[in-house]
Image (tube, rainbow, N blue to C red):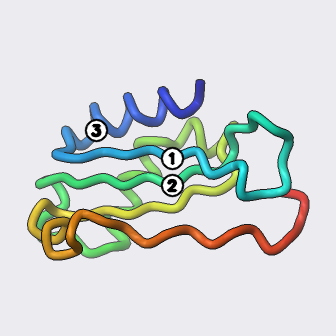
Amino acid sequence: MIQEVIETKLHNAFQPEYLKVINESYMHNVAPGSESHFKVIVVSDSFAGQRLLARHRQVNQALMEELSNHIHALAIHTYTPQEWNEKENSAPDSPMCVGGGH
């Protein structure tokens, strides 16, 4: 399963305090059971002092193989533990797909 690969790679890359990988493919116009659209929430001390773009680049780098071959869309939410606490341990919901064949 792609979801398990994503979880393993992000865990190994960031040793997160909190990690959640959500398959959001059901929200899009894809076949049932697809693994093509994901949302990841990564809470790690390794993001301290980094801007959002640098954090997202690190996640993209860790998942380069999956992004090249399996994942169509990836929503990335990265936080330090302090930021996560300030957000009351929640990330924004993803919008439903508005159409298209992806």
The Cα atoms of the two marked residues, 3 and 2, are separated by: 17 Å
Residue at screen point 40% across, 60% down: 57
* Amino acid beneath label 3: Ala
The Cα atoms of the two marked residues, 2 and 1, are separated by: 5 Å
Task: Give the mark nearest the N terminus, 3 or 2.
Answer: 3
Query: Dot 3: what SS?
Result: helix
Task: Give the mark nearest the N terminus, 2 or 1.
Answer: 1
* Amino acid beneath label 1: Ile
Residue at screen point 59% across, 24% down: 1
| In front of the other: 60 or 7 | 7
Q: Nearer the viewer, mark 3 or mark 1?
A: 1
Label drawn at residue 39: 2
Label drawn at residue 13: 3
Query: Dot 1: what SS?
Result: strand
Q: Position of residue 72 (x, y in %)?
A: 70, 51
Label drawn at residue 80: none
Residue assigned mark 1: 22
| In front of the other: 79 or 57 | 79
Measured along the vertical axis of the image, is residue 73 above or below residue 62? below
